[in-house]
């Protein structure tokens, strides 16, 4: 997943130097985008060998998520047992509300362990993810 992958108007790639999965949302996330995103994350999870995902989602140009896409995100069994850290940057009020709704629903309806926040800037997001990553690996080494 080193090179950028385009899913409709959205982009996703793995940053080897940081260990982050970066998603740039442009416009609305539709059903076919959600399906392909789920497949992409399933491939990432297979390659991560049990490590949590560190996800930077740039939502500055996002305009929404269709109800069909929300259903896919909530019902896809590949999200069960998903462990990770997600930061959503630059989201509008609507996108923050939708994101928080999806985070809470995932928490209740699956065994996933997703820690997620919304921040204003990419710098804040990268700093938070780096902090989570350091804490995770420090705890693993000292265990």
Image (cartoon, grey):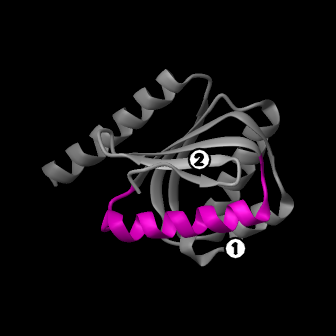
- What residue is shown at x 52% (from left), y 26% (from top)? 122
**What distance separates the C-alpha of mark 2 from that of mark 1?**
23 Å
* Figure check: 140 above or below 81: above
Q: Position of residue 42 (x, y in %)?
A: 49, 70
| 7 sits to left or right of 16 | right
Q: What number is the disc on residue 75?
A: 1
Range of magenta residues = 28-52
The one of 87 and 8 positioned closer to us in this rendering: 8
Q: Quadrant of the rendered structure where residue 51 is? A: bottom left
Q: Position of residue 33 (x, y in %)?
A: 70, 60
Residue wearing tag 2:
11
Q: Reply yes or no: does residue 26 show up in magenta.
A: no
The one of 30 and 83 positioned closer to us in this rendering: 30
Q: Quadrant of the rendered structure where residue 130 is? A: top left
Quadrant (top left/top right/bottom left/bottom right) for the C terminus: bottom left
The one of 63 and 81 positioned closer to us in this rendering: 63
Q: Quadrant of the rendered structure where residue 96 is? A: top right
- What residue is shown at x 76% (from left), y 39% (from top)? 95
Q: Earlier in the sequence, mark 2 or mark 1?
A: 2
Mark 2 Cα-neighbour bin, 10 Å: few <14, some 14–19, many ≥20: some
């Amino acid at each position: 997943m080193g090179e950028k992958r385009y899913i409709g108007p959205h982009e996703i790639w793995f940053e080897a130097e940081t260990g982050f999965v970066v998603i740039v949302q442009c416009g609305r996330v539709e059903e076919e985008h959600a399906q392909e995103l789920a497949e992409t994350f399933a491939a990432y999870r297979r390659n991560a060998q049990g490590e949590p995902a560190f996800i930077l989602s740039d939502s500055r140009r996002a305009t929404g998520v269709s109800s069909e896409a929300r259903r896919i995100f909530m019902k896809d069994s590949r999200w069960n047992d998903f462990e990770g850290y997600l930061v959503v940057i630059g989201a509008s009020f609507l996108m923050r509300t939708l994101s928080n709704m999806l985070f809470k629903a995932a928490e209740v309806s699956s065994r996933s362990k997703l820690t997620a926040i919304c921040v204003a800037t990419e710098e804040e997001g990268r700093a938070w993810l780096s902090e989570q990553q350091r804490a995770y690996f420090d705890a693993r080494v000292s265990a």
